[in-house]
Amino acid sequence: MSERLRRTEQRVSGGNDLDRIPARVDELMSQMTPSEKAGQLTQYFYFRLRAGASAEPGAGTDQGARPHLVEEALGRGEVGSLLFVTDPAEINRLQRLAVAGHRLGIPLMFGFDVIHGLRTIFPVPIAMAASWDLETIERGQAVAAREARAVGIHWAFAPNVDIARDPRWGRIVEGAGEDPFLGAAVAAAQVRGFQGTGVGQGDRIIAGAKHFAGYGAALGGRDYDEVNLSEAELRNAYLLPFQAAVEAGAGNVMTAYMDLNGVPASANRWLLTEILREEWGFGGFVVSDANAVRNLVTHGFAADVTDAGARAVAAGVDMEMAISDPAYAHLPEALATGAVSETALDAGVRRILEAKLRLGLFDDPYVDEDGARQVLADPEHREVARAAAERSAVLLRNEGFLLPLDAGRLTSLAVVGPLAHSRRDTLGPWVFDFDLDETVTVVDGLRRKLAERVRVDYAPGIRVAQRVFPSMFDMFGGNRPEDPEGFDEEAEFRRAVSIARAADIAVVVAGEWQNMIGEGASRSSLELPGRQLELLQAVAGTGTPTVLLVMNGRPLDLRWAAENVPAILDIWYPGTQGGAAVANLLFGEVSPSGKLPFSWPRTVGQIPMIYSHTRSHDPQKQGQRYWDEPSTPLFPFGYGLSYGQFTYSDLTVDHPSIPPDGTVSVSVHVANTSDREAAEVVQLYLHQRHGSASRPVRELKGFQRVTLAAGTSQHVQFTLGPGHRRHWSTAERNWVLDSSIFDIWVGGSSTAELTATFEVTPT
Ligand code: BGC
């Protein structure tokens, strides 16, 4: 076993007695029938909806398994895992059915979409990535894990590590954006946060990297549609965050829904066995996405559900996530006909039982319900969430240094827009167990901060905008946005403009309602939905200095605002403490320090657009590839302003020339020349001038977040080894390390200009 694999094993095993696990697994397996084995490989949806919800959920049109059917299967020992149960008492009840209600007493593993928090909601994942702050990201997921484990959840369907280069795709909000280097670092930090020292740690949960692989490249940005990616694109970009998650010890990987180059990802042996297990040495278990095994029939790939189950197992899917009617229930038939081998089936069962043993579930299957309440109420968790929201906001524009605002010089503030005071939208998508009463909106945050000193008036101004086609999450109570009763839009619009006119400063909050982003939330345009632009224009037209706060999970068309609104702060969906963080940012208690994790296009027609494109004919016209609009981004990747002022100088490389396996050390001097403390994300980009394949004009290969007090400076060091230069070359059909000249740029965004070179010579 390689050293890396052994380390991964150790991390995964946590504190449990690894040596005894195989014997306990053998002993259990020797007593199991084929149906019980197939059952261990099955995960069911199990729902109880909140009051106000209308139907049983289920992805797409499926209504989900009926609870009584699941409970019957539990009694037969034919369920390995449940998802979507978050109430500790209910978890204990169901666990008792599994443990006490069947002769083998194999405990259930409970999984859930712990995407950006359980009770304490953190900024959405794209926002956390915008912090470029790996410690904050790790701490956030550690808090989420602690809350989840306290209620009895053992496994998160996170991190989502899908590279997303097409913001029409709604699930861009769940990942770390367009870049594989940033994506890999964020993926590993999340795995560390969820799992701590490993799967056995008591207050942590299993991390499940998803959706393997290429899901973000859906044709036209349409969720679930097919993906066609070259091996070079897969290996140089889309697979890297998965590999980083595996190397960080992730205990689980989830498959993707769509076809990848014509083969469904959920039965793709090349991905699930050759790359994941044989190349990377993944030792955890693979789960399908919801109903993705049955869907092999929908794809026109499997002949029927029995064939679907058999082929998924053969490709390397250990567990089937089933909304209802699992295909894996037919595995005993497939075994009898020889369509699936006992070895393949047993390998999956072994992995699931191992995970349960490592989690310590056989010794301690139940949760402490009182303890759970205490953990969920821990005020420290809210503090971590507030700090994360402060660090993830990106200052996109600040003409004439309108921000930070000075409370001492203001008497009144007008806050405008329905999103400014919507608790549910402040939290963002993919949360279910939140507490709206404690959620701090922008209006709440500003009122609390300014108390009696500054008057804060609020007017929504316009109706909430609605989707043309409803969201599958609308069925959860409170998820579909609604106007206040008796809302008179024209009168409200006039009131919004009039409070803005009368105020010293106007703050407009605009963006997308949270049900417009996430799964099944692709869009054909990037415009601000509804009458938000009109409202923004009317408010700015009053002449009152205006700040635009953008609440979003994807880039939106801000061309008008970028020319006409002096200050724009991207606050994303900032979570439970969002409004408190925003107030601290607007009034300068902290300086914005987030940087964009994607290139922000001007308009939807530019998509897909990445900063790391290759150079081609007429490169001087790179910005004029369209005749009607610059082909440059509105805001580049890595961009974000600060209240501080940073200058970069003295970029040095320690060796002008190195062999292919050599390493250079890069140093740069960063100074904060302003009169306030601020954090900056120092970024390093690399370019290979020539070689066995054309390489991108620049690629992120290092970053460091530094906090500099007023008037201070620091030398920041980077190390660039062969791993940073290695790339998958289509010409060589392999990984290569080319001899070439390499350019480096270091600065505060992907347009950094301070540059140096070094050479890699043949050995
Ligand atoms: C999503 C997954 C999610 C699962 C369970 C699916 O529709 O694609 O990301 O984990 O549902 O909620």
Image (cartoon, rainbow, N blue to C red):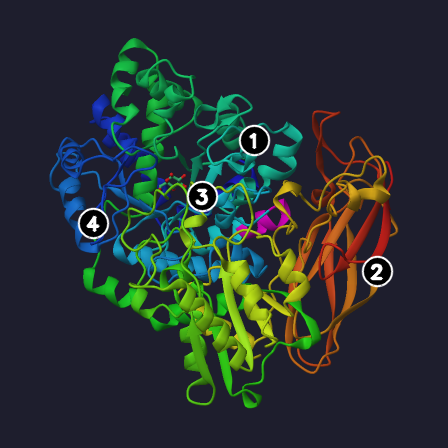
Give the x, y percent position of residue 745: 79, 55
Q: What residue did someone put label 4 on?
A: 91
- Check disc 3: other Cα within 10 Å, few if <14, some if 14-19, many if 20+: many
Q: What residue did someone put label 1 on?
A: 279
Of all residues, the one furthest to the top in this rendering is: 337
Query: Comparing marks 4 and 3, which lies closer to the viewer?
Result: 3
User: If you read the primary sequence from the N terminus, does the residue marked by circle 3 or circle 1 appear first?
Assistant: 1
Amino acid on which disc 1 is placed: Glu
Rendered view: 706 above or below 481: below
Tag 4 secondary structure? helix
Rendered view: 732 above or below 139: above
Residue found at x 55% / y 32%:
219
Query: Does residue 343 show up?
Result: no
Residue found at x 64% / y 28%:
230
Q: What residue did someone put label 2 on?
A: 652
What separation in Å lies between label 4 and label 3 (alpha carbons)? 31 Å
Q: How many numbered markers are drawn? A: 4
Tag 1 secondary structure? helix
Picture quarter with ligand 1: top left
Between residues 46 and 574, which one lies in front from this camera angle? 574
User: If you read the primary sequence from the N terminus, does the residue marked by circle 3 or circle 2 appear first?
Assistant: 3
Tag 3 secondary structure? loop
User: If you read the primary sequence from the N terminus, does the residue marked by circle 4 or circle 3 appear first?
Assistant: 4
Amino acid on which disc 2 is placed: Thr
What separation in Å lies between label 1 and label 2 (alpha carbons)? 36 Å
Amino acid on which disc 3 is placed: Ala
Q: What residue did someone put label 3 on?
A: 521
Give the x, y percent position of residue 204: 37, 55
